[in-house]
Amino acid sequence: MNYFPEEVLEHVFDFLTSDRDRNAVSLVCQSWYRVFIGNCYAISAERLIARFPRVRSLTLKGKPHFADFNLVPHDWGGFVYPWIETMAKSGLNLEELRLKRMVVSDDSLELLSRSFVNFKSLVLVSCEGFTTDGLAAIASNCRFLRELDLQENEVEDRRGQWLSCFPDSCTSLVSLNFACLKGEVNLVALERLVTRCCNLRSLRLNHAVPLDTLQKILVQAPHLVDLGIGSYVHDPDSETYHKLKSAIQKCTSVRSLSGFLEVAPRCLAAIYQICLNLTSLNLSYAAGIHGTELIKLIRHCGRLQRLWILDCIGDKGLGVVASTCKELQELRVFPSDLYGVGHAAVTEEGLVAISAGCPKLNSLLYFCHQMTNAALITVAKNCPNFTRFRLCTLNPTKPDPVTMQPLDDGFGAIVQSCKGLRRLSLTGLLTDQVFLYIGMYAEQLEMLSVAFAGDSDEGMLYVLNGCKKLKKLEIRDSPFGNVALLTDVGKYETMRSLWMSSCEVTLEGCKTVAKLMPRLNVEIINESEQVEVEASPDDRQKVEKMYLYRTLVGPRRDAPDFVWTL
Amino acid sequence: MADCSRKDEPCPQLLDLISKDREWLVRRDEQRRNGSSEDKKLELRLGPPGQDWTIKDGTKNHSRERDESLLSLSYFSNKASMNHSNSNSNSNPNISGTKRGFLDTVDRKTIEDGWITNNNNNGTQTQKFSSSENTVGTALSFLHKFPSTPQSLPVKAKESSQHCCTKVVDLQNAEEKAFSPTSVNTAVPNSSQKRSAPASAPVVGWPPIRSFRKNLASSSSSKPPLESQDVVSDKVAKEKQVESCQKGLFVKINMDGVPIGRKVDLKAYDSYEKLSSAVDELFRGLLAAQIDSSADGIQTKQEGEKAITGLLDGSGEYTLVYEDNEGDRMLVGDVPWHMFVSTVKRLRVLKSSELPTLCLGSKQEKTPLDAAAAAALK
């Protein structure tokens, strides 16, 4: 039962303080109150509570990562209701709940809000299944709520007044993030809420909050540390704008800025002041800021440590980042022109410039039109501290355009140089060679994402054999088949999960794994209409989507029809 | 710029990888130059390359075998890729040597271009290299299409890897198991067949971003980012674009004698005439109410509401003017409509009698009209 090695538990605190997004081992820690469960199907709520009856903070992750990209059907699973129900029944004193990629119904939120008197913090990331009615329940019933943080969830708007449901007696809010909500909010209720919550430090608004409301809010809450601006459109000659400017100048504590879901670029001058102190800037939703305004803004941000931006910043813009943001540690560049309409956004040049100017860079997500081996080798030399390196060429099998070679060597240089690399995603034309490099050099690698890469089973085997700390492996559209899958099935018990879609594994291969490894759930997701459960499906058929994961509790009982657990 | 001391540690190792390859490849290159490349060229061209080639190679010892096939490859690939690599060698002096040596041999593109047609023997041959660490082997393994029997995996392959670490020995063991019909089937010479996503056709779940961002991106892609050229009107136009794309283009409009202003959505009109009639509609009632109230209670309702006409040509009681992005007051109607829309900041409906007293920008030539307007008012 206990296949979590002891030394892992010793490192519990390291994992606890890590960022939510870090892919830590699916581990259940013994020490007091906080429990992190990387796969909600690895263990059951009953067993959790039996082992940790005093748990106060629970983190749960549901769907596999590729669900973010629509590769997992909606009702695959990851329902939080049973967890909340069980915890409620057992009288647990739950205070914090953090969920990622889970299905959260309004009923669950309602039950949550009524069951735990001391409930303080709800963080939902990439979840779905709830509406603003569920939020209303949280607002109404959680009397000591400190944190309501909604990040990129699909929330149905019910046109209710959920914000107004915070009672007048609620003064405890420290963090409120509803930037992902699509509907209107009651602006007066919002202003009142901000006014009475003097401890509010983090506030992220959605697009429905206009600039004049923002101005009033900032007057009430000058101590904000983290601000997400909703709509930032106004006439820069107006009095409101001037009031905003002076309100902003008093917000000397703001260190993190995001949003600008709608923006009038001429109004940006008002925020230059706070840019000077920013350590985190997320403009990845600010499609309205580009060109010189964007660059002008960046020039003020000399202390930036984290920057999320759209690729319309261009290579030149990244050059400005490189010369301005010397403290930069994390950079994410998202694509803005998805349909390849035309203008080249960022290429390898921008990345090389960043690597040269920002030696502290340790985390990268970079969507680009092209990449070269030479650039990657240079980046590897300049920035040996990468812990997370994710590169995505928009054409997934594009070779080095200068040499027409695969990008094997470039990525090889990255894994060789960055000894602390824990997470890696690769694209571009890639052969088995790159996996050989990864197996050889990426000793700390915990998560690897592969798409349209490799030549043969060898590639996958290099990784499985070489990366001793591998926890999550997700592969799509790559020529890895049964041999790779079956060569070392014991490996999968040391990992959290393996995803393979559009590869070469067959039903027979998957069945074999399931037979050999009873402590794994091997799930086949079959969405096609020709699901003939009665007739025995051909074992030689290739499996479209396979997801296997270790578990203590056997096949799950909530799997929908199209999911077969072998 | 960067702290070099921190970099010293990883750099040598990185360069080691590259320099080792370079050494190894320099040796190969030398052999190539010294060897009879012409013969090899012929070998390659004879019939199904695999058959003849393997027959010939079978008589030599392993290391020569390997070198030859490597040499063959590199020769061929150099031939085809000469333009490519040579032209680029000047641009990246630091890397090009490595690149050229290291990467030529995996110039898969040229290999694909027709050299290898696959058969069992060829597959066997190539397997030897794929189980060593060199990249050529890998390129070859990529290419064999047909099932090849694992048992031909040689012990020799292990000898061939010269700079492997102990890890690699493990890997090679794995490699021996790796070959199977299944896996080989999937390797096709034409890279586009299995793996490549055609650039234009959408692939499910590609690029890998959350749907949240996709929605945002698609709405922004319709507006190509302008390189603003510090022309004020461009900036304003862009701003208006942002604003108007979301909300319509509302500007304030005030009328002399009417204390309350209105807002008008310029996006709703496409000509001055339509704007003019809209202004009429907006203010007719207000104006009438104003006149009523200013008449000290005397109800002159029978007058009703008077249409506001002649706004554009100076012929009416009122004239439409606007304030542009430079702060100047301008007469409405001089510039094309779209240009007007891009520079207008607010509108005013002035009494025509007051026109001569205003600074009209460059519209001084309108005096004849003014005179006419003034005359009309009398």
Image (spheres, coloured by chain):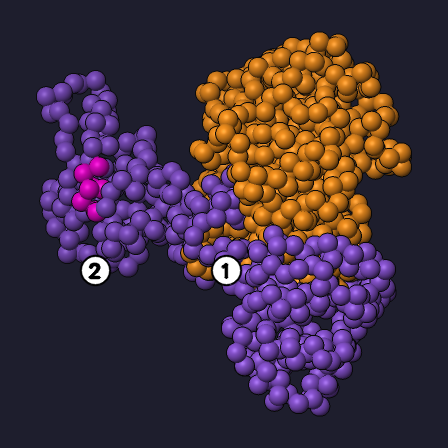
Chain colours: A orange, B purple
Q: Identify the subunit bearing mark 1.
A: B
Q: Secondary structure at mark 2?
A: helix
Q: Identify the subunit bearing mark 2.
A: B
x, y (%) of residue B246?
40, 40
Residue underneath mark 2: B365
User: Can residue A110 be seen from the camera position used here?
Assistant: yes
Instruction: Evaluate whether label 2 is on the same chain as label 1.
Output: yes
Residue underneath mark 1: B192
Would you say B243 lies left or right of A474 here? left
x, y (%) of residue A299?
62, 56
Q: Which residues are magenta?
A: B271-278
Would you say A241 lies left or right of B254 here? right
As displayed, is residue A112 above or below residue A299? above
Amino acid type shown at disc 2: Glu
User: Can residue A276 be seen from the camera position used here?
Assistant: no
Q: Residue at x 20, y 23 (%)?
A: B292
In the image, A507 versus A80, the foreground residue is: A507
As displayed, is residue A445 above or below residue B133? above
Q: Are marks 2 and 1 in contact (CB under 8 Å)?
A: no
Amino acid type shown at disc 1: Ser
Q: Nearer the viewer, mark 2 or mark 1?
A: 1
In the image, A205 versus B374, the foreground residue is: A205
Q: Secondary structure at mark 1?
A: helix
Task: Count residues near mark 1 (Cα–Cα under 10 Å), then give few for <14, some for 14-19, many for 20+.
Answer: few
Gap between marks 2 and 1, in whole Å?
69 Å
Quadrant of the image occupied by residue B273: top left
Q: Residue at x 46, y 56 (%)?
A: B198
Q: Residue at x 10, y 21 (%)?
A: B302
